[in-house]
């Protein structure tokens, strides 16, 4: 119970901070819509174990990196908070609505911070090249963020005693490892498509930075 209260307090504080930044730099409506569509699509690609010792356990993609690239950190945290609540209501029959804040703070927030950190590192250290943006900020970052989120979610379940530790790490972790590669491929592909057809939907991308400037003869 104290952990849940602390998680809700922290989430509310983060919501106020995020709201402050979003008020200073409002996002276009198209970015919000794109992030919402991505979140709905990837979270609906879920699987649930209905029998056996792991009954009730859900697996789904997160879309952490792609949504972060579309709307930035403050807005991404808001999107995932809403999606976690909706997912708990629709697919888990209200059973986990009380732990939404704990899940967002312990699992989603670290993954978002890792994605933002890797993005900042790449923009500061790595060459500004389209391939590097797609591979590093899309594919590789998505892989690492999904692995981190999956590991933290299993740790959270382990600490709560919801399932056997041996079953969690021996059976569930390999599934999450494979899902990480799926998320990486989808994120890299979607990032490339957005750069080609709708670069304005990527919050942290600009043609001026990543496209080589043409040399003029005059």
Image: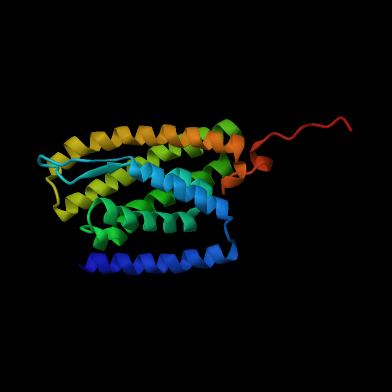
Residue at horizontal 51 percent and vertical 47 percent from the top: 34
Q: Quadrant of the N terminus?
A: bottom left
Q: Residue 110's x, y, as percent?
A: 37, 52
Q: Residue 128's x, y, as percent?
A: 61, 37
Q: How is the image coloured?
A: rainbow
In the shown orientation, is residue 204 left or right of residue 118? Answer: right
Query: On the image, which quarter does residue 148 sit in?
Result: top left
In the picture shown, does residue 147 fall above or below 76?
Answer: above
Q: Residue 111's x, y, as percent?
A: 38, 48
In the shown orientation, is residue 161 left or right of residue 70? Answer: left
In the shown orientation, is residue 89 left or right of residue 66? Answer: left
Q: Residue 44's x, y, as percent?
A: 34, 44
In the shown orientation, is residue 126 left or right of residue 45? Answer: right
In the picture shown, does residue 78 fall above or below 65?
Answer: below
Q: Quadrant of the C terminus?
A: top right
The answer to whether residue 203 is visible is yes
Residue at horizontal 25 percent and vertical 63 percent from the top: 98
Query: On the image, which quarter does residue 132 sit in?
Result: top right
Name the foreground residue: 94 vs 218: 94
Residue at horizontal 43 percent and vertical 32 percent from the top: 185
């Amino acid at each position: 119970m104290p952990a849940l209260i602390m998680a809700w307090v922290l989430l509310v504080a983060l919501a106020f901070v995020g709201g402050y930044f979003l008020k200073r730099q409002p996002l276009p409506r198209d970015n919000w819509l794109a992030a919402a569509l991505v979140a709905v699509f990837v979270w609906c690609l879920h699987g649930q174990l209905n029998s056996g010792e792991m009954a009730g356990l859900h697996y789904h993609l997160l879309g952490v990196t792609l949504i972060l690239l579309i709307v930035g950190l403050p807005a991404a945290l808001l999107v995932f908070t809403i999606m976690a609540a909706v997912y708990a209501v629709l697919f888990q029959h209200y059973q986990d609505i009380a732990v939404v804040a704990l899940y967002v703070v312990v699992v989603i927030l670290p993954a978002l911070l890792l994605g933002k950190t890797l993005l900042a590192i790449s923009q500061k250290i790595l060459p500004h090249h389209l391939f590097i943006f797609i591979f590093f900020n899309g594919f590789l970052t998505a892989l690492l963020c999904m692995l981190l989120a999956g590991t933290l979610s299993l740790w959270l379940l382990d600490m709560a005693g919801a399932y056997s530790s041996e079953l969690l790490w021996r059976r569930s972790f390999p599934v999450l490892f494979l899902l990480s590669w799926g998320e990486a491929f989808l994120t890299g592909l979607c990032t490339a498509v957005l750069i080609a057809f709708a670069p304005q939907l990527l919050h942290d991308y600009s043609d001026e930075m990543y496209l080589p400037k043409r040399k003029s003869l005059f």
